[in-house]
């Protein structure tokens, strides 16, 4: 999660070289793409958004008045989130938008081998992920951004506030409402899983 | 109590999604994406030039269209010689312009 970029402790001008930028891009690319994919829920659009993100980063790095940054990873995340929010806003008017094909998605994204060997748990987790994707699509733009950063990127509330240019209180409210909506959407799965785990004799 | 439920749900959700691990993204896809980024990094100036040309062409087209439209509507309507002579004689016979005629009403008793 931007660990390499954090370790680099790079300043913007230091990343402005093509080779340094290339190395940094390789280390951040997958994270940025998955963040965009989670926010946009469309692999093709996430691909474009990731490209836009790195293009914007490159252009900013090559500005003559570019300033030093403590955390390039966070800076890049902010660009990515804003790019996705812009796309989500403009999507409202795109009635002709092509829906992503499941086979296209499958060719690009494969679920990693799970650490849990239990196939039943695996299938259940997949079901949750599928339902979660649908439920996240129902969240507002800000709620979606806050949830993605918190849940998948493990960002602190303060970091999320900084990335989204909001105050911590507002982030808390967005997160609370997002969790409330998700809980409503996934209630049946949650209850089923709790009951199964509370039933004695289950492995 | 409600707060505990919410925290439990959040933890449960995190636990479930983590059990699947992070999706793997195809290396070919990432490489193609990088190539596209590098291609686009080299493009902005060309794009700007293309935009300038497109704007200039669009402006020219609008100007030419406007000019043609104006010319089309400015041409005098064709009237026959007979109509012209009849209009002229009409004007000659009328002593004063029509616009003045209502003024007479003010002074007539």
Image (tube, rainbow, N blue to C red):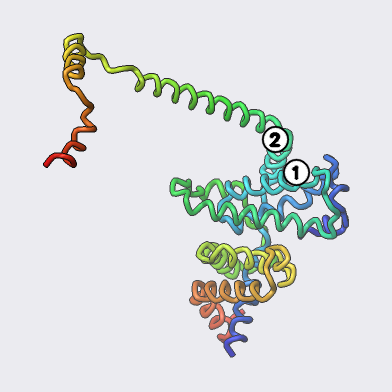
- Alpha-carbon distance for marks 1 and 2? 10 Å
Circle 1: element type? helix
User: For this view, does A93 lie left or right of residue B51?
Assistant: left
The residue at the point 44 percent across, 46 percent down is A96
Is the C terminus of chain B in the top left, top right, bottom left or bottom right quadrant?
top left
Can residue A22 be seen by looking at this rendering?
A: no
Q: Using the rendered image, report if marks 1 and 2 lie on a common chain.
A: no
Q: Chain for mark 2? A: B
Q: Chain for mark 1? A: A
User: For this view, does A21 lie left or right of residue B51?
Assistant: right
Circle 2: element type? helix
The residue at the point 54 percent across, 55 percent down is A89
- Please tell me whether residue A193 is drawn above or below residue B102 in the rendered image: below
Can residue A156 be seen by looking at this rendering?
A: yes
Residue tagged by mark 1?
A59
Residue tagged by mark 2?
B44
Is the N terminus of chain B in the top left, top right, bottom left or bottom right quadrant?
bottom right
The residue at the point 39 percent across, 19 percent down is B71
- Is the C-beta separation of discs 1 and 2 under 8 Å? yes
Q: Which corner quadrant of the image does residue A161 belong to?
A: bottom right
């Amino acid at each position: 999660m931007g660990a390499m970029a954090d370790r680099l402790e790079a300043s913007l001008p230091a990343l402005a070289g093509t080779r340094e930028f290339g190395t940094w891009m390789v280390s951040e690319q997958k994270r940025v793409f998955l963040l965009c994919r989670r926010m946009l829920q469309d692999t093709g659009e996430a691909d474009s958004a990731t490209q836009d993100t790195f293009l914007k980063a490159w252009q900013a790095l090559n500005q003559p008045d570019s300033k030093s940054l403590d955390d390039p990873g966070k800076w890049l995340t902010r660009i990515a989130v804003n790019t996705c929010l812009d796309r989500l806003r403009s999507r409202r008017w795109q009635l002709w938008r092509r829906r992503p094909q499941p086979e296209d998605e499958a060719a690009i994204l494969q679920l990693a081998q799970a650490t849990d060997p239990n196939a039943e748990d695996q299938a259940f987790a997949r079901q949750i992920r599928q339902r979660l994707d649908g439920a996240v699509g129902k969240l507002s733009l800000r709620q979606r951004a806050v949830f993605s950063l918190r849940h998948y990127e493990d960002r602190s509330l303060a970091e999320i506030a900084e990335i989204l240019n909001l105050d911590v209180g507002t982030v808390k409210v967005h997160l609370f409402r997002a969790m409330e909506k998700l809980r409503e959407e996934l209630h049946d799965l949650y209850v089923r899983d709790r009951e199964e785990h509370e039933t004695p004799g289950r492995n | 109590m409600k707060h505990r439920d919410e925290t439990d749900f959040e933890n449960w959700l995190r636990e479930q999604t983590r059990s699947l691990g992070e999706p793997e993204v195809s290396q070919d896809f990432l490489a193609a994406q990088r190539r596209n980024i590098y291609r686009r990094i080299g493009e902005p100036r060309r794009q700007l030039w293309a935009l300038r040309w497109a704007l200039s062409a669009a402006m020219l087209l609008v100007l030419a269209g406007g000019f043609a439209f104006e010319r089309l509507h400015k041409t005098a309507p064709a009237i026959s010689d007979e109509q012209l002579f009849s209009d002229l004689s009409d004007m000659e016979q009328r002593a004063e312009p029509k616009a003045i005629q209502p003024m007479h009403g003010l002074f007539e008793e």
